[in-house]
Image: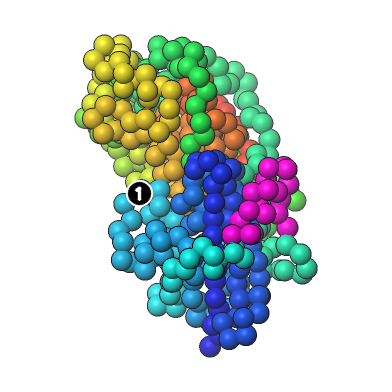
Amino acid sequence: MREFIVEADGGSRGNPGPAGYGAVVSDAVTGETLAEAAEYLGVATNNVAEYRGLLAGLRTAHALDPTARVHVRMDSKLVVEQMSGRWKIKHPGMKPLAAEANSVFPPGQVTYEWIPRAQNTHADRLANEAMDAGARGEQWSATGDDIEAEAVRGATGTAETRAAAALAPGAGVTGVAAPGDDDAAAAGDRAARAKPGVGEQPPGPAAPQPSGVAERPQAPGWSAAPDLGAPATLVLLRHGETPLTPQKRFSGSGGTDPSLSDAGREQAQRAAAALARRGTIQAVVASPLARTQETARIVAARLGLDVTVDEGLRETHFGAWEGLTFGEVRERHPDDLNAWLADPEAHPTGGGESFAETATRIAATRDKLVAAHAGRTVLLVTHVTPIKTLIRLALGAPPKSLFRMELSAASLSAVAYYADGNASVRLFNDTSHLRA
């Protein structure tokens, strides 16, 4: 049985900031370098970049020999201890990455070792080369005929976007709306526009596509690039109205978990009819909350599909602001609200979830779903913040753009993820076109 050494590293110039990873696979007996992989990730955290480096190294080793034993050496104590099972993985955004890394080889075939940074210079150099290439607007490329590394780069892609939004008639990213699930903070968006620009939050890399995916014609209805094969297309449906929606109250994952109102159920029926006419949806995945589950069941019944639940699609937890209007939050928690409007790392009062944490969770969920549904069109029934975050990440827009998007109840958007890692966004944000 062959034995490989995988050395991997990742870095972020700003944490979060421009990030990249590097990985090298060598023969454990001879020390010969067999393959290299590196990638510029766009804006991400150190931890995301380190996990992405690990994934690239494992995938490269697997491409060389899926039966080999692999010994991973990294200078990230966090990744090594978590992957060895000695430390718990508490961050929700790291759990899917660790699970994906564990799935590359069978259990027991991979071991981990922490090494000082001075002993990880090869992978560190590759990571910095990738970040330097990204700063120049270029992709890192290996020297020589490194087929395995090329395959990994094809799987991980780049952080660049393929195209600007393609707007349907009557649709658009118009007006100003709050990031809360029921557009609670509409007035706050005007205040946010007056705030200084905030730093990038960790979105993770562009969603990966597994290498070797067979090309096939895409079903009609969503755009595709023929030379890249059918993309993995995530059609994003916001749930229908709840009793809290017209009142514009914060309604996240930590509140009363309301069901749809009669108006919301009618909206879901109209969305189901529109999607049935299009005829392209092949699977339905929904947030676990009641309003998304009810919307998803209505749509799935019309399409003759089952509903799969994904915890990663839940709405942001708004802490003590759950159930309140923007004005009520402004009156009761003015300092916390101002901080939240200015900084994606800030938390709502009472231990809610920051937008940075939401973005990390959503990026990991996106990567998992795109990998699982390569070449397919999947309906995600979710909430305002997850949908806005997916669109923001696909466009490479800053966190403050969350306050610039309006998302109506039961509205549709779509993001297509191509084999080269790029993405194309289409917005259908006017629910008036959804007629049964």
Q: Report if residue 123 is visible in the image.
A: yes
Is residue 128 located in the magenta-colored stretch of the structure?
yes
Question: Which residue position holds label 1?
Answer: 91
Mark 1 Cα-neighbour bin, 10 Å: few <14, some 14–19, many ≥20: few
Picture quadrant of residue 38? bottom right
The dominant secondary structure in magenta is helix
Query: Residue, x 59% and y 59% (percent of image)?
Result: 124
Query: Where does residue 145 sit, x and y in percent of width and height?
Result: 77, 69
Q: Is residue 159 above or below residue 141?
A: above
- Residue at the location (39% across, 39% down)? 357
Q: Residue furthest right?
A: 144
In the displayed image of the protein, which residue is found farthest to the bottom? 1
Q: Residue furthest front?
A: 118
Viewer-nearest residue: 339 or 263: 339
Say which residue appears at 40% left-offset and 48% top-offset: 93
Residue 436 x/y as whole percent: 46, 26
Q: Secondary structure at mark 1?
A: loop
Task: Please tell me which residue lies in front, 375 or 250.
Answer: 250
Q: Give how far across and how far down residue 344 sits, in percent.
A: 43, 31
Q: Is residue 314 left or right of residue 429?
A: left
Q: Position of residue 404 (x, y in %)?
A: 51, 20
| Amino acid type indicated by mark 1 | His
Q: Which residues are magenta?
A: 124-141
